[in-house]
Image (spheres, rainbow, N blue to C red):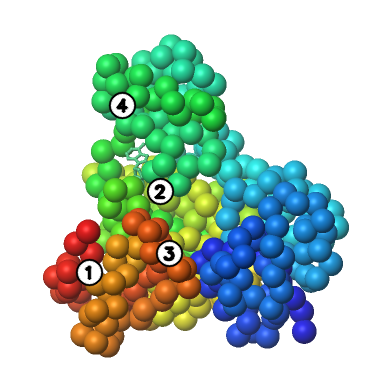
Amino acid sequence: GQTIGIIGGGQLGRMMALSAKEAGYKIAVLEPSMDSPCGQVADIRIVAPYDDEAALEELADVSDVITFEFENIDYEGLKRLAEIAYVPQGAELVRITQNRVTEKAAIVEAGCPVAPYIVADDYDELVNQIDKIGYPSIVKTSSGGYDGKGQQQLNSKEDLPLAKSLFEHSQCVAERFIPFEKEISVIVQRNGQGETYCLPVGENIHVHHILHETLVPARISGETYNRAVEAAKKIADRLELVGTLAVEMFVLGNGEIIINELAPRPHNSGHYSIEACNVSQFEQHIRAVCGWPLRVPKLLKPSIMVNILGQHVMPLCNSISKHADWSIHLYGKTEAKVNRKMGHVTILTDNIDDTLNEIEHSGIWSE
Ligand code: ATP
Ligand code: MG
Ligand code: MG
C-alpha cells in the first residue's frame, strides 16, 4: 500500500487521514505535539518541529505523496521537501497564501476584487497611509493571524495607537471595513490534470470572529452564486492550484462580492460536505493530491454545520440523547479550553429556519 504524508496534526489532518484510510492509504504525520487529533489516527508519527530537517527527511522517506493541513509551515523547509519528495501542491501556494500582501496581489492578478487596502511596514507608515482608505478600517498582521487574532478595527484617527502592538511581530495590511450583508466561502479543488470543481457555496456566520455556523446552500441569488464560483475558479487557475483552496468572500447589498482571504487547505466551512455531499472536501482533496479523477460535487440535502468550542462540549454531551439526527464529530482533543475548536455537528434538514431555531433553543451554544 501507499503512504500519504501529512504536515500538521490538527483536525483537518485527522479528517484527511480518515478519508485516505478508507481508500486504503497509510498515513504518516509530522507534528510537534505528542498527542494530536491526526496523530491519534495515523500509522506513522514523526514528532518534531515543522522546520526540523531530519524529520522532513524521514517524512520524505516514508511517504509516496505529501500534503499539508495548514499554511503556516516553514516555506523554505517545504521547498526543500519538494526536492526530495513528491509534493504535488508545490511550495508556491503556501508562500503566497501565508502572507496577506502576496495573497491579495494574487487575487487582484486573477481579476477579482478585494477591499481597498494599504501595506505598512511599521506604525508610522500606517499613520501616513491610512487616509488612502479612511475609516472604519481593519489592520491585520500580514502573516500568522487566525480567528480574528492579529487584527484591530479602527473607527477613527483616535483609534490608531490601538494598532501599534500589531507591528511588533509583523508587517501589516490595513483594509477598508466592508459593510457586508453576509459572508460566504467557496471551496475549490483541482488535480494536476486541471480538473476543477467547487463545493456548494456555504454561508458563514461568525461569533467573536470565530466561525460558528455554515449554512448550505448559502442564501444568495443565483447571480451572486455564479460570481462566487467563477471568482474561486479564476483564483485557483492563477495559483495553478493542486489540492484545495478555500476562498472567503463578503457579499454586498447589491449582490457583488469581495474576496476576503484564502486558505490553501480544506476549511472549517466545508465540513458539512462529509454528510451533505456525495464527496467530502477531504475525500476530494486526497483524490486531487493522489492524481485521481475528481468527482462532481453534489449537495444531497441542505445542511447546517455548527462548531463545538471548548465551552460547548459539556452541554452537548448532556443533550446528545435529544438529537438523533445530528452527526457529531469530536476531534480527540483532551483540553476543552474556551473558544478552542473541539468538534462540529452537521445537521441535514429540509427546513433551514426550523433547524436554526432548534440549534438556538438547544442551549448548547449560549456561551
Ligand atoms: P480565519 O480564522 O478565517 O483565518 P482571520 O483571523 O484570518 O480568520 P479574517 O478572515 O481576515 O481573519 O477576518 C475575520 C473576520 O473579521 C471576517 O470573517 C469578517 O467577519 C471580519 N472582517 C475581516 N476583514 C473585514 C473587512 N475588511 N470588513 C469587514 N469585516 C471584516
Ligand atoms: Mg485567515
Ligand atoms: Mg477568515
- In the rendered structure, find residue 364 and report the number of the disc placed on it: 1
Mark 3: few, some, or many residues within 10 Å (few <14, many ≥20)? few
User: In screen coordinates, is 332 left or right of 360?
Assistant: right
- Dot 3 or dot 2: first in sequence order is 2
User: Does the image show residue 135?
Assistant: no
**Mark 4 lies within 8 Å of ligand 1 (Cβ measured):** no
Q: Residue at x 30, y 81 (%)?
A: 326
Mark 3 or 4, closer to the camera: 3
* Secondary structure of the residue carrying numbered label 3: loop
Question: The residue under label 2 is which amino acid type?
Answer: Asp
2 or 54: which is nearer to us? 54
At label 1, the amino acid type is: Ile
**Under 8 Å from ligand 1: the CB of mark 2?**
yes
Image location of residue 367, percent across then percent down:
22, 59
- Whether residues under marks 4 and 2 lie with C-beta atoms below 8 angstroms apart, the answer is no
Q: Earlier in the sequence, mark 4 or mark 1?
A: 4
Q: Residues within 10 Å of mark 1 (few under 14, many from 20)?
A: some
Where residue 314 appears, x then y in whole percent? Answer: 29, 72
Disc nearest the viewer among 3 and 2: 3
SS of the residue under disc 1:
loop
From the viewer's perspective, tell me whether residue 231 is left or right of residue 78: left
Find out whether the residues at labels 3 and 4 contact each other: C-beta distance under 8 Å. Answer: no
Which residue is nearer to you in this view: 200 or 152?
A: 152
Query: Upstream in the sequence, badge 4 or badge 2?
Result: 2
Q: Quadrant of the N terminus?
A: bottom right
Q: What numbered label is drawn on residue 154? A: 4
The residue that appears at 29% across and 16% down in the rendered structure is 157
